[in-house]
Image: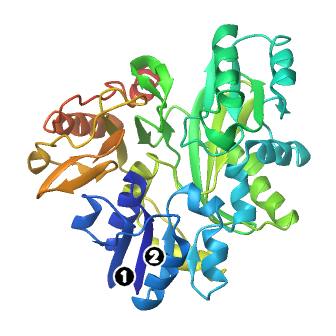
């Protein structure tokens, strides 16, 4: 089988890495890829949103399956475009991808079908949103409606922060058209958890849970990022709570999309808050999470290509998916200044000295035979271990072996779980 993966980040590197292990996969391509992906797959210089060029390459290279990594092309309708041309695609059509592409749509869907989530209101008028905001208490959450690369959500601890976020989104349009509408919702307290699920219509096969770290600094301080690290499993959250989340949130969401005439096929990401009242949905994404994928796929025992083909062919219900008992920890190495402005083109040293970890490239490029930085999140260093503590130690040992100017990372990835277990 010949497979093309669409994307250029750490998530796509993890997908390529997992597919490379499949005996089904004979030839593996990635468009456009990055310096790390190029060591595993043949990179094709085509951007994620250049649908016509992607379709032409698929025909010319006799590709059997296209796997779409990022949300932008999915919300843009790449699955519709390729399927209409007889090309097999792993990833939802645009109507289903709206569950991530519009937070307003997602919140209304949850409300309609009784899916537990935070209380909220939506607005298209800045003045109305501003007036509503001042009738609320802080902390409060302000969200841009559309896609904003994981940065369109502000947890405001003061009214001044909430006002700034609202102005950034709706007046200054720092996220462009994604800020045409806004969601203002109650702040939920508890433990966050992410569950990715393979979905084929109403058939849901949840993956092992993970916990992401969004703020840029230790102790969850500083602005939100695309994710500074993650770990799996989440041992301080009982299995019964995970099962409740699947029963009350994830399966109902998949069934709701079927009832709405928007059947979802691909990976449905569910961001959850485990509150005193039980799990509640924070968000849905229409694709593999990043960096959750970097700890979830290394724990997968079942052939990923088999699972993807089952979804594409409507046979997911026949699949038995198994997982390794090992724990995984991923530490993201970011450029200095991220999520604000940062430099690119800085040489990365020490990749040849890495020990037990898998290094997933997120923002890298190859210049004059040298691997250099090319994004805000540069690398994801993932290690497996018999325990979470062992995986954490191995990951941070390899983090210390890698260096580039301005390298920044959080030092507390997975400590929440380890502290909770000790207590």
Residues 195 and 177: in front is 177
Rendering coords of residue 66 (x, y %): 50, 76
Q: Is residue 274 visible?
A: yes
Rendering coords of residue 164 (x, y %): 64, 17
Task: List the residue tagged with mark 2.
Answer: 305
Q: Is residue 387 visible?
A: no
Q: Image quarter for residue 391?
A: top left
What residue lies at 27% left-to-right and 40% top-to-bottom? 344
Rendering coords of residue 304 (x, y %): 45, 70
Q: Are marks 2 and 1 in contact (CB under 8 Å)?
A: yes
Any mark on residue 25, and which?
A: 1
Mark toward the start of the polypeptide (2 vs 1): 1
Residues 145 and 257: in front is 145
Above or below: residue 31 compared with residue 272: below
What residue lies at 33% left-to-right and 64% top-to-bottom? 17
Q: Quadrant of the N terminus?
A: bottom left
Mark 1 Cα within 10 Å, few/some/many (few <14, many 20+)? some
């Amino acid at each position: 089988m010949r497979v093309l993966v669409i994307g250029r980040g750490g998530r796509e590197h993890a997908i390529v890495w997992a597919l490379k292990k499949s005996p089904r996969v004979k030839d593996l391509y990635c468009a456009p890829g990055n310096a790390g992906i190029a060591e595993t797959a043949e990179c094709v210089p085509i951007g994620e949103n250049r649908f016509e060029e992607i379709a032409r390459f698929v025909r010319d290279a006799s590709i059997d399956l296209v796997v779409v990594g990022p949300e932008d092309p999915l919300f843009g309708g790449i699955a519709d475009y390729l399927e209409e041309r007889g090309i097999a695609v792993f990833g939802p059509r645009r109507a289903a991808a709206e569950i991530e592409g519009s937070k307003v749509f997602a919140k209304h869907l949850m409300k309609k079908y009784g899916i537990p989530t935070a209380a909220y209101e939506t607005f298209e008028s800045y003045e109305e949103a501003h007036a509503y905001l001042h009738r609320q208490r802080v902390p409060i959450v302000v969200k841009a409606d559309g896609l904003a690369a994981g940065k369109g959500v502000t947890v405001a601890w003061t009214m001044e922060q909430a006002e700034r976020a609202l102005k950034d989104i709706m007046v200054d349009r720092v996220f462009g058209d994604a800020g045409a509408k806004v969601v203002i919702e109650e702040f939920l307290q508890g433990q966050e958890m992410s569950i990715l699920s393979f979905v084929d219509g109403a058939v849901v096969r949840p993956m092992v849970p993970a916990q992401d770290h969004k703020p840029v600094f230790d102790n969850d301080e500083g602005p939100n990022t695309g994710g500074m690290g993650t770990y799996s499993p989440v041992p301080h959250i009982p299995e019964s709570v995970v099962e409740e989340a699947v029963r009350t949130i994830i399966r109902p969401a998949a069934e709701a999309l079927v009832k709405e005439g928007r059947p979802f096929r691909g990976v449905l990401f569910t961001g959850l808050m485990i509150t005193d009242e039980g799990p509640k949905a924070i968000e849905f994404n229409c694709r593999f999470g990043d960096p959750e994928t970097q700890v979830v796929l290394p724990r997968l025992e079942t052939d990923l290509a088999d699972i993807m083909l089952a979804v594409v062919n409507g046979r997911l219900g026949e699949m038995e998916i198994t997982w390794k008992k090992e724990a995984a920890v991923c530490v993201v190495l970011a450029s200095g200044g991220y999520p604000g402005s940062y430099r690119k083109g800085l040489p990365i040293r020490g990749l040849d000295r890495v020990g037990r970890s898998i290094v997933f490239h997120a923002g890298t490029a190859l210049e004059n035979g040298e691997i250099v930085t090319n994004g805000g999140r540069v690398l994801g260093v993932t290690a497996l271990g018999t325990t979470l503590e062992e995986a954490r130690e191995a990951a941070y040992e390899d983090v210390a072996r890698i260096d580039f100017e301005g390298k920044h990372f959080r030092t507390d990835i997975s400590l929440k779980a380890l502290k909770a277990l000790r207590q």
